[in-house]
Image (cartoon, rainbow, N blue to C red):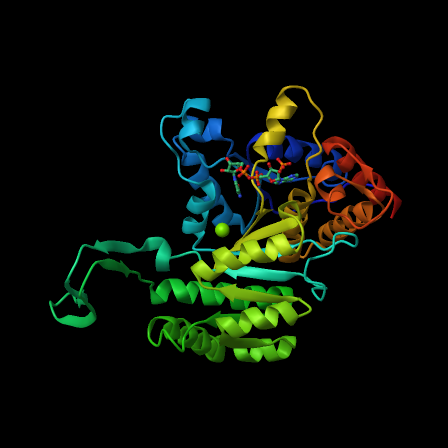
């Protein structure tokens, strides 16, 4: 049988440490033997980012806009320790942040469900996809530690000089103050990305804020979502047989706990930060969590939700055996290949992605897995495989189905 042909290249963003090692193994064992893989390659490994003054990251984001689909390996976000370790010219920004800003995108995170890795919440049968608004609110705040008695006001000065002024509080003693903001433009992009992704994946969309208490700020989120939904999406949602529903954040939390899963939960920035960690740990493992960045214009960048697994990499460098889970990185590739196939009308490529995912899940369900999963599985008679042997086992399953 010949290899599957591709018409349009994928944007391939290579990364760092252990995930960079897995990246090559996945390509060599699971992709290149079956696909005439066309990629436009960008090396986002920290060394090359440093060499190019991070230009390579911007270039990869531009290429993603051009081609529409990217797949990204985990990358190091430099901190003080990395400055010395890699002899960096500058503390380069997080590539994910740079790419997200360039694409104006929203991140959707979803767990990969396999039998034997049960979520802590017994009734969660299907994945819950979490969409986090990634701009503003408390993450772009201005704070004051109030020293003592005095009046705090909220003032907006328009371009023509007119003012809107509200009293926040008349302090009689020390206290604290915080100013936060968001923009209609950013909320609109977020809403559109959520509605598009719901249509794309044929899942219901939930959105929740605290609009009963925050009657202008949070209410504005609710109104923008509602307006866009009625104007552009209501008919499409009906045709697809899916639902958009808004509720209070406390109600959403209670309902999520009782739900079966199989929906997208859109959250404001802070709620998304907290809830995504709760949902992902309740589903079992960060190594089984996928992540896709979707722009309002319909550009997609797929990756694993975990980092570069530094501790395993240092073991690998010392020549010790590692058992690093490659599932989320495999699913980043299948997600991107399936989307590429969908956009190009390439059925073979889409079927390949489905089959590789199935083979990966079946391999685990047959009891072959990496150490992190072996520690939490309910399956008996488990075989713990090293990083490379797990990928080889997936290939064997793939060949057999
Ligand atoms: P991490 O790479 O996600 O790893 C944290 C720990 O989680 C690991 O030490 C390991 O636990 C476990 N783990 C995560 N992924 C695993 C996998 N695939 N298989 C098995 N175990 C896995 O997070 P980190 O150590 O905080 O960050 C390392 C680097 O990644 C940092 O430089 C950070 O900037 C970067 N990072 C990048 C991204 C991204 O590119 N999207 C995201 C997050 C972090 P044990 O050691 O106990 O086995
Ligand atoms: Mg967090």
Horizontal and vertical percent for residue 16? 55, 32
Please tell me whether residue 357 is drawn above or below residue 312 in the rendered image.
below
Residue 73 appears in which quarter of the rendering? top right
- For the point 63% across and 52% down, which residue is it? 340
Horizontal and vertical percent for residue 301? 55, 49
* Residue 399 in view: yes
Q: Quadrant of the N terminus?
A: top right
- For the point 46% across and 79% down, which residue is it? 231
Please tell me whether residue 280 is drawn above or below residue 60 in the rendered image.
below
Horizontal and vertical percent for residue 254? 58, 71
Please tell me whether residue 26 is drawn above or below residue 141 in the rendered image.
above
Q: Residue furthest left?
A: 161
Q: Nearer the viewer, residue 152 or 305?
A: 152
Q: Residue furthest front?
A: 173
> How many marks overall?
0
In this rendering, position of residue 143 left or right of residue 46: left
- For the point 63% across and 78% down, which residue is it? 239
In this rendering, position of residue 91 left or right of residue 288: left
Horizontal and vertical percent for residue 169? 21, 69
Residue 374 appears in which quarter of the rendering? top right
Q: Nearer the viewer, residue 198 or 42?
A: 198
- For the point 17% across and 67% down, which residue is it? 158
* Residue 136 in view: no
Residue 316 appears in which quarter of the rendering? top right
């Amino acid at each position: 049988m010949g290899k599957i042909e591709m018409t349009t290249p994928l944007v391939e963003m290579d990364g760092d440490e252990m995930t960079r090692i897995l990246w090559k193994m996945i390509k060599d064992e699971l992709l290149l033997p079956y696909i005439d893989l066309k990629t436009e390659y960008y090396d986002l490994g920290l060394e090359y980012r440093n060499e190019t003054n991070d230009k390579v990251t911007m270039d990869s984001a531009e290429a993603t806009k051009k081609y529409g689909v990217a797949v990204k390996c985990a990358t190091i976000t430099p901190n003080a320790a990395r400055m010395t370790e890699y002899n960096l010219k500058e503390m380069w920004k997080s590539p994910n942040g740079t790419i997200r800003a360039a694409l104006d995108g929203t991140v959707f995170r979803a767990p990969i469900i396999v039998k034997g890795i049960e979520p802590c919440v017994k009734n969660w049968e299907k994945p819950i996809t979490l969409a986090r608004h990634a701009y503003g609110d408390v993450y772009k705040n201005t704070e004051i530690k109030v020293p003592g008695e005095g009046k705090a006001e909220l003032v907006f000065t328009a371009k023509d000089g007119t003012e809107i002024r509200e009293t926040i509080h008349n302090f009689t003693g020390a206290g604290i103050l915080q100013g936060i903001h968001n923009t209609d433009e950013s909320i609109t992009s977020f809403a559109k990305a959520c509605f598009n992704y719901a249509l794309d994946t044929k899942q219901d969309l939930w959105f929740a804020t605290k609009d009963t208490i925050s009657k202008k700020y949070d209410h504005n989120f609710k109104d923008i979502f509602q307006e866009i939904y009625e104007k552009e999406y209501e008919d499409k949602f009906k045709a697809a047989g899916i639902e958009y529903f808004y509720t209070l954040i406390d109600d959403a939390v209670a309902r999520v706990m009782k739900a079966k899963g199989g929906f997208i939960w859109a959250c404001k920035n802070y709620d998304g930060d907290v809830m995504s960690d709760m949902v992902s740990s309740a589903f079992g493992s960060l190594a089984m969590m996928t992540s896709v960045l979707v722009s309002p214009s319909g550009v997609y960048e797929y990756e694993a939700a975990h980092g570069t697994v530094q501790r395993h990499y240092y073991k690998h460098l010392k020549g010790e055996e590692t058992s690093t889970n490659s599932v989320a990185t495999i699913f980043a590739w299948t997600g991107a290949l399936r989307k590429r196939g969908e956009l190009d009308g390439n059925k073979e490529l889409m079927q390949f992605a489905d089959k590789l995912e199935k083979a990966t899940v079946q391999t685990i369900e047959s009891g072959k897995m990496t150490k992190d999963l072996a520690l939490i599985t309910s399956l008996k008679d488990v075989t713990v495989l090293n990083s490379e042997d797990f990928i080889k086992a997936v290939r064997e399953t793939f060949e057999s189905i």
